[in-house]
Image: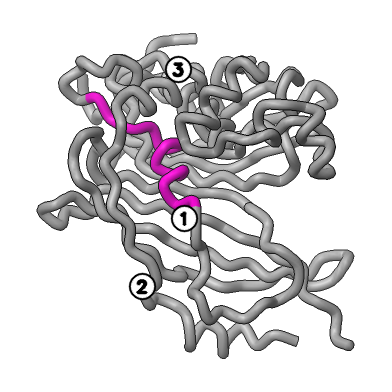
Amino acid sequence: MSTINTVADVEFGVELATMTPDTSLDAVRPFAEAVGWGGGRFDDHEKAKKEGLPGALVPGIMAMGFLTSIIHRWAPVAKVTTIDTVFRAPLIADEICLVNAVVTDIDEDTGVVELDLTVKNERDETRVFGTASVSLPLSA
Amino acid sequence: MVDIEELKSKFLNTEFDTKDFILDAAKLQIVAKQCGEQLPMYCDTSHPDFQALPSYIASLAAGRHLPIDFPRLGGIPMDGGKAVTCHAPVKPNVKLTGKTHLHDIYDKQGRSGRMLFMVSRMEIYDEAGTHLASSDSRMVVREKPAQ
């Protein structure tokens, strides 16, 4: 995939390289603690099941973080100005998830690019979806 | 059935919560690292433009999402999603203020009945009063069936 330096480098419909983030409990636990959400539902499968959950959860806002990361990997100069995520279903810790994004609109006059975002599990079930608006330089 | 327009007229756009924050750079760095972020402006605390990722900004809106006198509409509201709009970098070690209001109320008809959505918006300001970012929390509740 070519390097994105300006809005002129962006192709409509391009799919960003899929990211498979670390969803292990060892990754989720420090995230949850750092945002002040420590507790069984984010760091222990058994405790989460006692709360009626299918397992320890990956916080929805961590999935939002995966989505901004995939954008920054694609275009390090991009500034994510708006990201809107819908938490459709729980994302379970220790389960593989696939983070994807696709370019859906380009405004070459303003440098604003729109993307559709998804986080799916291995069974191709969408857990989180959303949109982002990013700002790119008009010229290098 | 809940009257959405009545709720809107009573509750929208009235500030109901204010919080002050000073963000810890180490926590911002942990969040960035665990999200797979690679850009130094989010991962390296010594970077001159070190700042919070949108996902950290979203976490600031945890807590009271509805006005204290907002009616109970059914079950416990679930977290339906988050949105963040960034106007300027949100940086650590400076005093920030988050002011929250109800931004929108709407409904959707589902197979199992009507779902009600409430969007609370926290606007984050620095000490100079510059609006740095907004963080929306979308809560969803299934309407209690009529008795």
Q: Is residue A27 above or below residue B58?
A: above
Measuring 18% from the left and 40% from the top, which residue is drawn there?
B94
Going from the N terminus, do you reach mark 1 or mark 2 first? 2
State the separation of the CA atoms marked 1 and 2.
Answer: 14 Å
Name the kind of residue labelled 2 in the image.
Answer: Glu
Residue B9: give x, y in percent of width and height: 48, 87
Say how many tags the image has: 3
Name the kind of residue labelled 3 in the image.
Answer: Lys
Measuring 58% from the left and 32% from the top, which residue is drawn there?
A63
Q: Please tell me how crowded label 1 is: few (under 14), some (14-19), or many (20+) other residues with Cα within 10 Å.
A: many
- In the image, is A102 to the left or to the right of A53? left
Name the residue beneath numbered marker 2: B15
- In the image, is B78 to the left or to the right of B86? right
Mark nearest the camera among 3 and 1 is: 3
Chain letter of disc 2? Answer: B
Residue numbers of the magenta segment: B50-62
Name the residue beneath numbered marker 1: B136
Residue A62: give x, y in percent of width and height: 55, 32
Q: Secondary structure beneath disc 3?
A: helix
